[in-house]
Image (spheres, coloured by chain):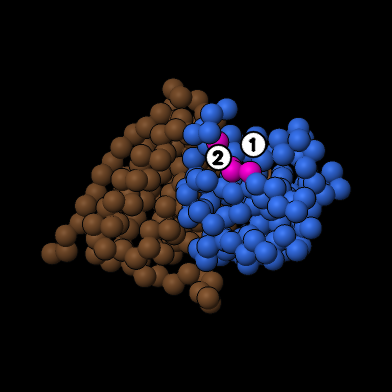
Amino acid sequence: MTEHVEFKVSIPSSLHEGLALQDRIVQLMERFAYSPRDVFAVRLSFEEGLANAIKHGNQLDESKLVMISCRIDDNRMRVEIQDQGAGFEPQAVPDPTQDEFIERSTGRGLLLMRVYMDHSEYADGGRCLIMERQRNSPLPITEN
Amino acid sequence: MSKSDRRIDIEEISGVTVARLLEKKILDEANIDALGQELFALVDKDGRKKIVLDFTLVEYLSSAALGKLITMHKKTSTAGGKLALCSIQKDILDVFKITQLNKVLTLCNDLDDALKKVG
C-alpha cells in the first residue's frame, strides 16, 4: 500500500495565516521528493486558492473559518479549501487575458490554478475549491 | 523605514532608477501591499520616470503581486515615464506568459537590456 500523508486544519480569515500552511505543504512535497516545478505549481495555486477563500469568500471576516485538507502520496497531491462565504460562479469571472480585462489589477488567480494544477474545480456553490496535481505533470510552457 | 524593513533596494544608473526586489517569495498579501506602496512612491512621491525592476532574487510571484505590477505600469505610463522588468527566472517568466502580461509589460533578459529600453 502506498504511503500517504494527510491533514485537515481550520484557520481564521487572515491573510497572514497562509505562509505557514504553504511551508507545511512544501515540506510534505519535499519529503515525497516532488520536483521543484511541482512544488512551484502547488505553492502558487494554493496561495491563489487560499487568498480567494479569505478575501472573496469570507470577505476577511476573521469570525469565519477556512478549512483546508491536504492529501499527498508518491504520485499525486490533492488540496481542498472550503470557505464560509456566500459562494460565487466561477464561469462569471472574465478571462483576464482578453484585451478588455488584461490591464485589470485582479482576476488572474483562477487562470493560474487551472493552468498549474491538473484539476481545479469549485463545488458547493463556489465555496469549496478542489485541486489535484500528479507528480511531474507537464506545465504548458516548457521551452527554455 | 529601517533598511531591514525595505522590500526594494534602489540604485541610480545613468538617470535610471533600478529597484531590486529583495523578497524571494512575493506571495503574502500583507507584504505585497507594502511592496506596492514602496514601488508606487517611486513615481507618486519621488517623481521618478525611468524605472527598472530587477527580479534576480524573486522565486515566487502571486497574482496579487501581478496586480501591483500592472498598477505600477499604469502609474509610470500616466506620468510619461517608462518601466521595464529584468532578470526574471524561468518559472516566473512562465507566469507572465500564461497571464499574457508579457504583452503589456516590458520584460527584458538582463539589466543592460532594460537600461537601454528605458534610458
B61 relative position to B108: left or right: left
Q: Which residue is mark 1?
A: B38
**Residue drawn 65% across the image and 34% down it:** B37
Colour of chain A as rendered: brown
Residue B23, given in percent of the width and then of the height, sits at 50, 45
Give the residues drawn in magenta, as a range: B6-10
Quarter of the N terminus of chain B within the rendering: top right
* The quadrant where residue A64 appears: top left
Residue B95, given in percent of the width and then of the height, sits at 57, 60
A50 relative position to B53: left or right: left
Which of B103/A115 is in front? Answer: B103
Q: Residues within 10 Å of mark 1 (few under 14, many from 20)?
A: some
Disc 1 marks a residue whose amino acid type is Glu
Mark 1, chain letter?
B
In the depicted structure, whether residue B111 falls above or below residue A14: below
Give me the chain that's blue.
Answer: B
Quarter of the C terminus of chain B within the rendering: bottom right
**Residue drawn 28% across the image and 57% down it:** A30
Mark 2, chain letter?
B
Q: Are marks 2 and 1 on the same chain?
A: yes
Q: Residues within 10 Å of mark 2 (few under 14, many from 20)?
A: many
Identify the mark at residue B7; answer none if there is no mark.
Answer: 2
Residue A36, given in percent of the width and then of the height, sits at 38, 63
